[in-house]
Amino acid sequence: MSSEHGHDAHELSFLRKYVFSVDHKTIGLQYLITSFVFLLVGFGLMMLMRWQLAFPGRAIPLIGPMFSPDLAPNGVMSGEFYNALGAMHGTIMIFLGVVPLGVAAFGNYIVPLQIGAPDMAFPRLNMMSYWLYLPAGTLMLLSFFLPGGAAQSGWTSYPPLSVINPGQTVWLLAMVLLITSSLLGAINFLVTTINMRAPGLSLMRLPVFVWSEMVASVILLLAFPPLEAAAVLQLMDRVAHTSFYMPKDLVILGQRYTGSGGGQPLLWQHLFWFLAHPEVYVLVLPAMGIVSEIIANNTRKPLHGYKTIVYSMLGVGVMSFLVWAHHMFISGMTPALSNFFLVTTMIISVPSVAILTCLIFSLQGGSIRYNVPMLFALAFLPLFGIGGLTGLPLGLTVTDIYLHDTYYVIGHFHFVVVTGSIIALFAGVYHWFPKWFGRKMNDRLGVIHFWGSVVSMVGIFTPMLVMGLAGASRRLYDPTAQAHNLIVQPLNVVSTYFAAALGVFQLPFIWNFFHSMFRGEKTPENPWQATTLEWACPSPPPHGNFAKTPRVYRGPYEYSTPGRATDFWPQTDPS
Amino acid sequence: MNATAIENPDTHSGISNAKLGVWLFLASEVMLFATLFTTYIVLRLSATSWPWGWDALNVPLATLNTVILISSSVTIVMAYARAYDRDVRGFRLWMALTLALSFGFLIVKAFEYGHEFSMGIGPSTSVFYAVYFTMTGLHGIHIIGGIIVNSALLYMSFVKEDWENPLFLGRVEGAGLYWHFVDIVWIFLFPALYLL
């Protein structure tokens, strides 16, 4: 195998090396940078919305006059523009930001290294995934500038509204591209992990991160096609004027809908959430995997309950397909179905809690190194816990009837995805940066970024929980239009200030990332004294990764084994 | 591309990467068509009236297409068997026959569609026709995908280097698996839309 790579190591052109690369590491970094750019764009859209929510009717400062009069007359955001921002914020953050970052960026770079493989199973397919994702994302952004504007029907795109509203067609086309990209990626990850593990690397010796990527890939593979089909049907409704989702005798603005009718609006909700709930676990599982790696490494002891974590992840994966309709308790679905989904929702919280508990117990008795990745990993535990626990009242029908479609829901899932997934993904960046560039990110800037981000995030989302409990509906363009919201309106202002602070505290991160890439402190091959395979090759790894296919002798987290001179025992160490 | 290192058949599962990849792809395809069949069931159960296939569609033509498609599943297996025995002429013959049958299927389908369009019937006519056109249309796109893959394999059998590549047989097998899947989807579509 190594001789083959010797032959392959000749100089490639700039285009083949950095743009249309088939190397999993380059593709991983392409995904990393692109998804961070999308996160920033999604954040920018959200800042515009937050201005409107805190100061409704006031002109957007600085950039307000730059928008066309259709979007923001006299710099004041229009309702249509607000709706477009809402739909695109959700879509971009989830489908173009967090999932590509967690699954594709980290998965591409780290999984082949952690299993001791020279590359992914299908390198060209891998390149194609990225080159479907980028046009899909670009198309999504371009939709703001196309006639009809961007999609305005929320990231959930419920019909009949989504079939009637302008802008949705481009959204659907971009989604079909994106789903195809994800499917190719999922197949690639699964084949790579199943087939290309180094000798001796049995399944129960896999790092937790690789497990999390495997389960996430299975979810993507089986849950995304239904959304693809559902998107095709919605596209048909819009383009070919079919009536898959359009009921009979629908009246829109006093006019009868001209289509044949006979469709089912609820069908979309079922198909959409059949993907979108498993998708939540696609957002969360890689985050849990990253946190597990970092906690084991920095507590210098084996993970508490490795097998429990692995089986819980598998359990979460299976159960995630059986909970989708808890998003639809007040949609008019049969109460008997509601009860079924209530029970499954309570069941799925068991393995999730098991994973978190194992991670917390892993801290017990460890001599913890409080480096930057570990700070983020430690913050993940309680904050993701809040995200999970605030979800329980939404999974129980009785409390959900009150809380549904309020700001409480927004607070809940942002605690899960932002203070959960994104915090963990930051941890991963700081942890694996030395592997990517052979240099370390600056610690002081890292600590500033950490405290600034964590405090701001909690400051943004806690007020939302309170507003929701007070009865403030989500998706309101002007929250002051309803008298009962006025009492909690100051919380909207608080939330907006914290959102601005969150933006400011990303500046040290961005500077730190690019500056450290070229000027950061140089690090050895294994700066964290870690045990897993990715640290057994040079940083950054050359094409083909390992000079010689590694052999694996033990599990992934053999730290502080009694009787050994060092406190870590690499998986590749034959002694 | 160092294909031998990347697609080393000496894998953990004992199944080649390509074959495992095709199976996983087919799993996702099953979910895609399962969703469409679910849609069909949900819409049909809630419909006030649902036309009988014999009245609304051309059953004899669809029966002909069923025969064509099942025959093409046989011919692609024959092509695989010829490739297995390293008989390049036999492979080309059976693969060409498979392609001819696939084009035959599309021509019959086009004739069917054309007849319906000429009668003023389209996807927007009713939910039944929406389901019919969308499902058979997506199936038709899958047929076209299969034609592209099978044509590529036929072309490769004329390139010495490709024909002698040890991976060639696996590629034919992968294409065959996919083609059988497309065939099976039709075997579900035919009774669901035309007969029931």
Image (spheres, grey):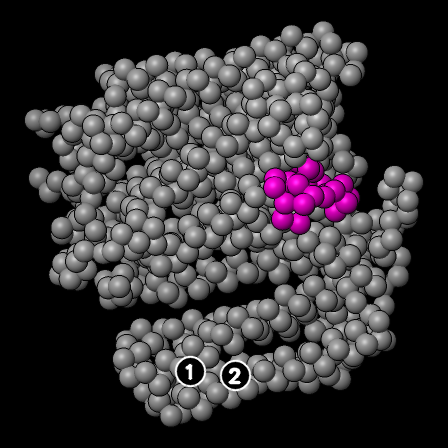
Dot 1 amino acid type: Leu
| Residue nearest the viewer, comparing A258 with A75 | A75
* Residue at x 48% of width, y 87% of height: B96
Q: Position of residue A497 (x, y in %)?
A: 54, 12
- Residue A164 among those drawn in magenta: yes
Q: Is residue A552 visible?
A: yes
Classify residue B147 as left or right of residue A425: right
Could you tell me if the residues under marks 1 and 2 are in contact, i.e. CB atoms within 8 Å?
A: yes
Chain designation of label 2 = B
Q: Is residue B35 above or below residue A294?
A: below
Q: Dot 2: what SS?
A: helix
* Residue at x 51% of width, y 88% of height: B97
Numbered range of the magenta stretch: A144-170
Q: Is residue B139 above or below residue B64?
A: above
Looking at the rendered image, the quarter that the N terminus of chain A falls into is bottom left
Classify residue A500 as left or right of residue A238: left
Q: Position of residue B23 (x, y in %)?
A: 45, 63
